[in-house]
Amino acid sequence: MKRTLENSYDFTSKKAFAAIDDWNYGYLDQNNIKRFLRGAGHVATKSALVGILRRFDIDGDARINLKEFELGVKSTLTIFAAPSKPPRVNSNGAVNTKRSS
């Protein structure tokens, strides 16, 4: 999934971080993540939120800064990943998710 996001023509970790950092604090905490997930239709438990923080938070301050976020979402195989083409859009404006062989 990480490589798929990285290879998406419009993905940047800064844009993703900014989308979650809804109050522009410059860091993510449990509240930012909870609001982001709720807005995406997911209800996260407290233990799930703590797990996300622990996964990304390198310095142990219970906050995820941009550098920690970038390291967390970056695939270890990025250098081997082939760049993807921009998605095809059909006449209705919907993105075609099927790839041709």
Image (cartoon, rainbow, N blue to C red):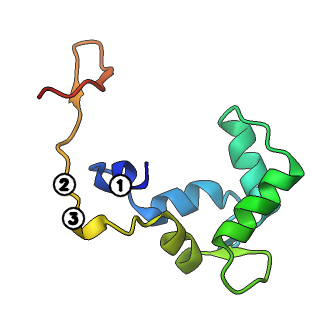
Residue 18's x, y, as percent? 56, 61
| Neighbour tally class for label 2: few under 14, some 14-19, many 20 plus, Cα within 10 Å | few
Residue 97's x, y, as percent? 30, 26
Real-space CA distance between mark 1 and mark 3, rounded to the nearest whole angstrom: 10 Å
- Helix, strand or loop at label 3? It is helix
Q: Which residue is mark 2?
A: 83
| Circles 2, 1 touching at the beta carbon (< 8 Å) | no
Which amino acid does the dot numbered 1 rest on? Arg
Which amino acid does the dot numbered 3 rest on? Phe
Real-space CA distance between mark 2 and mark 1, rounded to the nearest whole angstrom: 10 Å
Residue 81's x, y, as percent? 23, 59
Residue 1's x, y, as percent? 43, 48
| Neighbour tally class for label 1: few under 14, some 14-19, many 20 plus, Cα within 10 Å | some
Residue displayed at 70% across by 43% down: 37
Q: Which residue is mark 1?
A: 3
Q: On the rendered image, what quadrant is the C terminus found in? A: top left
Question: Can I make out residue 59 in this image?
Answer: yes
* Quadrant in the picture for residue 43: top right
* Quadrant in the picture for residue 33: bottom right
63 or 74: which is nearer to us?
74
Q: Which residue is mark 3?
A: 80
Q: Mark 1 or mark 3: name the one nearer the start of the chain.
A: 1
Real-space CA distance between mark 2 and mark 3, rounded to the nearest whole angstrom: 9 Å
* Quadrant in the picture for residue 75: bottom left
